[in-house]
């Protein structure tokens, strides 16, 4: 039996190293996190028309997401109800049905079993087609971003995002919404799925050092941090964490971050034009956040960067490797020229040959693979930076850290991680009062 | 054949030697030499990965490929400078990117002194202690003679075979 409580020490800001390695812990994560949480599927922009579909991975389960005739969206497990073959072996497309390649059972867009070859001749009435449709997965969207959930008792996506929406809206809502640019790249990393998630949720600390070389050549606001030559000054940003572990870090006014030359000018102009409108729509605080650089993660494994415009899913493949899905993310109302320019830079920085993407991989892999060693695996991970400086932000309801660089969002991520692993069910998770997590986090 | 005009044997040989030289410079980490002596200022250096679709699907409108590289001279030079930084931790200790270049076809290009070059490439990349990765891809190049008669790379489009990239990333010159 795993002692889930001991894996994370909320009060002291540490975690057990075994969370990056242990098979039993991983199985518990699949059951208590991936079976329960809202997991990213696709975006409206990738399935605009009836019959359009994409595939995705929730935990280790393959799913299909398909636009219905009436414009709604349904998700299904990508598996045939007969003998368990994949019903969709491509990644995206437009179709009228999904036909299994084994014996030819055919399913409608709504998942119902429509046709069975030689149904009368071979089954002679014993097969109940009405109970052999594709298995539907609960799917909901926020601002066009579709997420799936295997747990019928889970709160709505809207409530699951909770206070995090305050920050999400800065980009997802403010100038008319966001959209993804596909298809995604798909790559392997030999790391635990949490190692990139924790990095994206709250690691501004590594930027100047891990990425020293790439920052030094790219230009843009972050160049000054290359080689840790500059400490972000007070007020340069903050870190934020919320109830279910969603979190982010903001580097104020560093939106185009890595964009120099004409691309940087385009992006800065767009931000400058839109900031007053965002302030008007969402208030002064968020007007100030708009145009900043955001590193963010929706719990458990969906990360994105605003300003560097990359959107990722870290899909686990066992405890020690992952499949990385990477899309571009842009504001819908950006002129095409701006969209193309920032997406091109997102490819250059965080795509398959991304100038920064490659830098991160070695860290994530070694912090996973070293746990092969029993002695190393017994150790603890430290995320204490900024402890004591965290407080509740009255406007958003989230907990925010005192500076741009710190580990507040790490601690919030792992506080939630522990709570999910320990809870028997969503009922169990939701029985505490809504502020209990803040008292736990702040040690009060 | 495909309206392509094969080149004379000596040109074929010259291009072949040029490709081998390029591979050697990359393997020896002489990327600055590669850029200075083999790359044209007008370079368009691209690599793509293709999403898997049903062959006959014509109704799905979204583009079916994603760029891995989409570089002009400015950005290629940026990458070369990055590789030279003493703070590029991923390249220290050194990594070895060894090209095996095959199936070479050379045809006359659109203009005199321009050549269309098709190759298949296998790259074996070794880095750190435990990592060895292989990559298989096709290249469609255009090479052009500069004023001094030196062949320079003007265009390269690489199509990477593996959709799910087990080699983690393509942070090297393809
Ligand atoms: S397994 Fe799908 S039709 Fe038989
Ligand atoms: Fe990073």
Image (cartoon, rainbow, N blue to C red):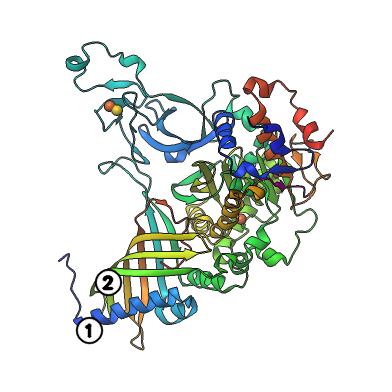
User: Up-down: is A240 above or below A187?
Assistant: above
Q: Position of residue A165 (x, y in %)?
A: 65, 36
Q: State which tag comes first along the sequence, 1 or 2.
A: 1
For image coordinates 54% across by 24% down, the residue present is: A151
Q: Are marks 1 and 2 on the same chain?
A: yes
| Left or right of A140 on screen, residue A234 | right
For image coordinates 38% across by 35% down, the residue present is: A53
Which chain letter goes with mark 1?
B
Tell me, for residue B116, which label it has, or none: 2
Tell me, for residue B74, which label it has, or none: none
Q: Is residue A212 visible?
A: yes
Q: Quadrant of residue B26?
A: bottom left
Tell me, for residue B10, which label it has, or none: 1
A180 falls in the magenta region: no
How would you classify the magenta stretch by its main secondary structure? loop
Q: Position of residue A225 (x, y in %)?
A: 69, 63
Q: Toward the viewer: A407 or A311?
A: A407
Q: Write the start and end of the magenta stretch as one range.
A: A378-385
**Label 1 crowd (10 A; few <14 / some 14-19 / many >=20):** few
Which chain letter goes with mark 2?
B
């Amino acid at each position: 039996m795993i002692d889930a409580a001991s894996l994370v020490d909320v009060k002291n800001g540490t975690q057990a190293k075994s969370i990056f390695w242990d098979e039993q812990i991983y199985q518990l994560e699949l059951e208590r996190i991936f079976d329960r949480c809202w997991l990213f599927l696709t975006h409206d922009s990738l399935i605009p028309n009836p019959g359009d579909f994409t595939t995705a991975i929730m935990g280790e389960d393959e799913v299909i997401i398909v636009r219905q005739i009436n414009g709604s969206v349904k998700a299904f497990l990508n598996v045939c109800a007969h003998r368990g073959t994949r019903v969709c072996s491509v990644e995206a497309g437009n179709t009228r049905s999904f036909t299994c390649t084994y014996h030819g059972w055919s399913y409608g867009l709504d998942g119902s079993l429509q046709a069975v070859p030689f149904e009368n001749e071979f089954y002679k009435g014993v097969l109940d087609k009405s109970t052999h449709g594709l298995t539907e997965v609960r799917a909901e969207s926020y601002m066009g971003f579709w997420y799936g959930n295997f747990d019928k008792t889970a709160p709505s996506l809207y409530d699951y995002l909770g206070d995090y929406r305050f920050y999400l809206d800065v980009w997802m809502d403010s100038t008319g919404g966001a959209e993804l640019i596909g298809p995604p790249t798909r790559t392997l990393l030999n790391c635990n799925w949490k190692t990139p998630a924790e990095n994206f949720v709250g690691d501004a600390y590594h930027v100047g050092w891990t990425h020293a070389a790439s920052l030094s050549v790219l230009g843009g606001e972050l160049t000054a941090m290359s080689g840790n030559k500059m400490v972000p000054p007070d007020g340069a940003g903050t870190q934020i964490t919320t109830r279910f572990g969603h979190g982010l870090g903001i580097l104020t006014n560093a939106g185009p971050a890595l964009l120099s030359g004409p691309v940087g000018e385009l992006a800065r102009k767009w931000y400058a034009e839109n900031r007053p409108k965002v302030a008007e729509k969402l208030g002064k605080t968020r007007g100030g956040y708009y145009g900043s650089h955001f590193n963010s993660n929706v719990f458990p494994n969906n990360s994105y960067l605003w300003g560097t415009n990359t959107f990722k899913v870290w899909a686990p493949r066992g405890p020690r490797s992952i499949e990385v899905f990477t899309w571009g993310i842009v504001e819908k109302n950006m002129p095409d020229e701006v969209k193309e320019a920032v997406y091109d830079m997102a490819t250059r920085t965080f795509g398959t040959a991304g100038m920064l993407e490659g830098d991160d991989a070695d860290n994530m892999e070694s912090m996973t693979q070293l746990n092969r060693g029993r002695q190393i695996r017994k150790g603890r991970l430290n995320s204490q930076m900024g402890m004591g400086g965290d407080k509740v932000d009255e406007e958003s309801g989230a907990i925010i850290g005192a500076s741009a660089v710190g580990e507040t969002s790490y601690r919030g991520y792992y506080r939630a991680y522990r709570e999910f692993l320990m809870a028997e069910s969503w009922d169990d998770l939701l029985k505490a009062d809504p502020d209990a997590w803040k008292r736990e986090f702040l040690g009060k | 054949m495909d309206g392509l005009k094969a080149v004379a044997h000596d040109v074929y040989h010259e291009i072949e030697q040029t490709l081998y030289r390029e591979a050697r410079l990359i393997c020896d980490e002489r990327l600055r030499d590669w850029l200075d002596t083999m790359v044209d200022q007008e370079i368009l250096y691209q690599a793509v990965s293709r999403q898997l679709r049903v062959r006959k699907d014509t109704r799905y409108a979204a583009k079916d490929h994603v760029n891995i590289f989409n570089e002009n001279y400015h950005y290629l030079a940026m990458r070369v400078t990055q590789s030279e930084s003493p703070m590029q931790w991923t390249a220290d200790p050194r990594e070895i990117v060894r090209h095996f270049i095959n199936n070479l076809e050379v045809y006359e290009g659109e203009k005199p002194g321009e050549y269309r070059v098709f190759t298949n490439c296998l790259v074996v990349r070794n880095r750190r202690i435990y990592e060895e990765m292989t990559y298989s891809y096709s290249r469609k190049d255009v090479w052009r003679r500069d004023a001094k008669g030196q062949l320079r790379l003007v265009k390269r489009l690489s199509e990477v075979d593996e959709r799910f990239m087990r080699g983690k990333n393509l942070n090297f010159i393809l």
